[in-house]
Image (spheres, grey):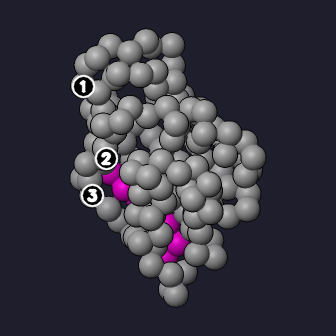
Amino acid sequence: MADHNLEALWEEHCRYEFETRDVDATMATMVAEPYVNHIPTMTGGVGHDQLKRFYKYHFIGGNPPDTRMVPVSRTVGHDRIVDEMIFSFTHTSAVDWMLPAVPPTGRTVEIPLVAIVQFRDGKLAKDYVASTEGV
């Protein structure tokens, strides 16, 4: 991955997820058969079609408008990035991928997360997200 800027690839992917909220552009940053797992709730998808459906109906399309990620630290390796962040939003809509069966409360939510992102051939291949709450 020496010929790819992993940080730029990851930031582009996140920009499509959280700023432009463009499912097709997000998917274009990933390999043909990506794997995403939000470990605490076991949500995400395996393969293009399953992940695209998850992004469209549960993740990109379901996050509240003020969703943001506040960086805490980043470690960049040869083929992966580990990001620690605070994931924050006002709970104005259902966020079923993170808070299943919890109706909107109108309250501010801040959850510490770790994302472990693996790259292959200049695209995201695997993304594991885990909450560090209580650790």
116, above or below 37, in the image: below
Which residue, given by chain and number where applicable, does mark 1 sit on? 108
Q: Please indicate, yes or no, whether residue 36 appears anywhere in the rendered image.
A: yes
How far apart, in angstroms, are the residues tagged by discs 2 and 1? 13 Å
The three-letter code of the residue at mark 1 reads Thr
Q: Where does the C terminus fall, quadrant-wise?
A: top left
107, above or below 33, in the image: above
Disc 3 is placed on an element classified as strand
Which residue, given by chain and number where applicable, does mark 2 sit on? 69
Q: Pointer 1: residues within 10 angstroms few (<14), some, or many (20+)? A: few
**Pointer 3 or 1: first along the chain:** 3
Residues rendered magenta in the picture: 78-84
Disc 2 is placed on an element classified as strand
In the image: residue 129, left or right of residue 46: left
Which residue is situated farthest in the bottom direction here? 3
**Pointer 2 or 1: first along the chain:** 2
Query: Which of the pair 50/75 is nearer the observer?
Result: 50
